[in-house]
Amino acid sequence: MNKVTMGILAFVALAAFCLVPLGVMDTDAEITAEDGTIMKVSGKATFDIEYTLSGTEEGKLTYEAKVVDGDGNTQSNAVTPSSGSLESGVSKSLTVTGSKDSGSYRLVVEYFVGEDDDKKSVHKDTMRFKVVDPIVLKLNLKADNTDVSLDKFEVYFVVDGKKMEDSYTFVSFSSDGTGSASYEWIADPSDGEHTFYVEAVSGSDMIKGLNEKHTFYVGETSYTWLTVVIVIILIILIILAIRIYRKPIKNYGKPKSRR
């Protein structure tokens, strides 16, 4: 094999190495969102972190964690525990407290190897998550037969056709047969129209309000009322225009002087 061919092969190998995504090569650290990456304001969620020492890394393994907002500002007391020791290849759970303000945030975890006086940073990992204001869905229910005991009637909420497993709740009906169910939907839905309804765990034909689809809006509202107001104003303006057009014009000019 001549030198030119060997040079080409070496160049191809180097290029292939450089084109390998960093995320594929860097597999020694991991952050897992146990409760998902969407949480409600002032709520709590669990994130698991894990780091595996490479063959060239030896010594005490520690970490430091923080939450930063979109501007890079660190949120105080947002991670518990915010620092500590780790075992190589063993996950550790961190509790993250959501800000009182909705928005996008990042959990930043930095790993160190070595003793306290001589430790060095070996990796920094980040996971994005969102803090949202929960959307409260509520529905009134009515039992046809008040003689039947419906204490702790089990229901689920179905939002946009998807059954919300965390919406499982009990409904207690009063003596007059009325009851209500509510659910905090913690999500980051698209703007526009959405639907929900309530279904019984074990269906019941005695309850009015079950399986009836309802509409709500995110990021906008139904403009029906605004349309009505605009139509009313337009009608008033048309009536005024007609009256002004039909009203005779009077000449209030000065009379001609006498000769």
Image: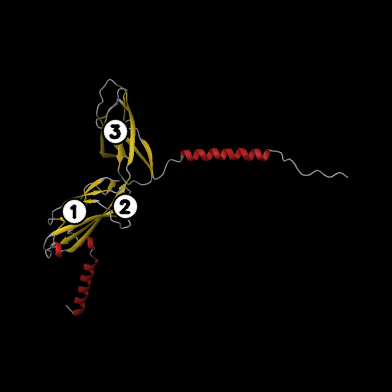
Above or below — where is 226 with respect to 4?
above
What separation in Å lies between label 1 and label 2 (alpha carbons)? 20 Å
**Residue on which the image places disc 2:** 104
Q: Are marks 1 and 2 in contact (CB under 8 Å)?
A: no
Mark 3 packing: few (<14 Cα in 10 Å), some, or many (20+)? some
Horizontal and vertical percent for residue 254? 78, 44
The label nearer to you, 1 versus 3, is 1
The label nearer to you, 3 versus 2, is 2
Q: Earlier in the sequence, mark 1 or mark 2?
A: 1
Q: Identify the image quadrant of residue 10.
A: bottom left
What separation in Å lies between label 3 and label 2 (alpha carbons)? 33 Å
Horizontal and vertical percent for residue 226? 48, 40
Q: Identify the image quadrant of residue 143.
A: top left
Q: Earlier in the sequence, mark 1 or mark 3?
A: 1
For the N terminus, give its image quadrant. bottom left
Q: Identify the image quadrant of residue 120.
A: bottom left
Mark 2 packing: few (<14 Cα in 10 Å), some, or many (20+)? some
The reply, left or right, for residue 240 in relation to residue 157 is right
The residue sitting at the bottom extreme is 3
**Residue on which the image places disc 3:** 199
Horizontal and vertical percent for residue 25? 19, 62
The reply, left or right, for residue 93 in relation to residue 206 is left
Q: Mark 1 belongs to which amino acid?
A: Ile
